[in-house]
Image (tube, rainbow, N blue to C red):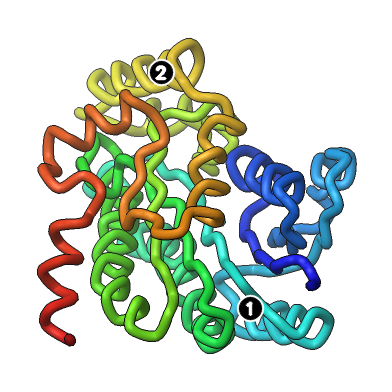
Amino acid sequence: MSPKVVLITGTSSGIGLAAAVAAANAGYRVVATLRDTSRAGALRESGGDLDVRQLDVTDPASVAACIDGVMADYGRLDAVVNNAGAGHLGTIENESVDEVRRVMEVNFFGVVQVTKAAMPHLRASGGRLITVSSVGGVVGQPFNEAYCAAKFAVEGFMESLAPVAARVGVAVTLIEPGAVASEFVANLQVDPAEVIANAGPYAEVLQAYVARTRSSFGTGAQTPAQAAEPIVAALTAEHPALRVQTSEWATAFTGTKLADQDGGKVLGLTATWIA
């Protein structure tokens, strides 16, 4: 039998890169996608057997072309890992609504776009739909209003889709990392010093938040490889949980809000609504 095919978005660095390499090492045929293929150096140098392709999750034509290409070349799609996304730093008084929309476009609507295109093929294969969310999709955090709103939306979308997808053979899983030692500042797509300088009455508290966050992404963070381990586990588990935290810290942190941490009680309830 040919190996199972998994498409992973946002694989230029961090969790996406680590997940692509780990899935390949686990025997999957990995289609590693990224918006800008000029940033594929780490993928190509990883030593993994990876099929690197261009995919911009915010562009419907790009999403369709990539998935159609995978089906044309392999004839199957067994799993998708929605990992592409971008961080953000700011508060609503100091930024435009258009900036908030851009954050939602990448972190939420990009997930929706890929999921819609992939679902017919995942349904055909009885596949897996795995989405990298965040502890920020469960607990709102200062100066992360737009980012957490997008991740909250991802959580609600996937939790609602899960019982429906299960009825047609597709398992849905949300991966919830905490701090991961990757490119924190680069992933923000802004200069924190500039944002602080223009923060007006919020400057002092924003500076405190940035200092705390830099520390947590430095000494106390997981490696991307550690954060990617639950992704591969969700690919291979017979019955993957709806919600998986990537560390004990992430479980404790989300536990301040979630009593049903693996999502089993919620799914047990909503699945009966369509039985």
Q: Position of residue 200 (x, y in %)?
A: 26, 30
Q: Where is 37 relative to 269, above or below?
A: above
Q: Which residue is mark 2?
A: 216
Q: Where is 53 relative to 263, above or below?
A: below
Please name the amino acid that badge 1 sits on.
Answer: Val
214 horizontally vs 252: left or right: right
Nearer the N terminus, badge 1 or badge 2?
1
Q: Where is 193 relative to 129, above or below?
A: above
Secondary structure at numbered mark 1: helix
Give the residue displayed 36% in from the left and 45% down from the top: 244
Secondary structure at numbered mark 2: helix
Distance between mark 1 and mark 2 Cα atoms: 34 Å
Task: State the image quarter where residue 271 is shown.
Answer: bottom left
Give the residue displayed 23% in from the left and 30% down from the top: 253
Q: Which residue is mark 1?
A: 63
**Disc 1 residue crowd, few under 14, some 14–19, many 20+, Cα 10 Å:** many
Q: Position of residue 38 (x, y in %)?
A: 84, 53
Mark 2 and mark 1 in contact (Cβ < 8 Å)?
no
231 horizontally vs 103: left or right: right
Q: Position of residue 268 (x, y in %)?
A: 15, 66
Name the quadrant of the C terminus.
Answer: bottom left
Q: Position of residue 26 (x, y in %)?
A: 70, 48
Q: Nearer the viewer, residue 110 or 259?
A: 259
Give the residue displayed 63% in from the left and 54% down from the top: 10
Name the quadrant of the N terminus.
Answer: bottom right
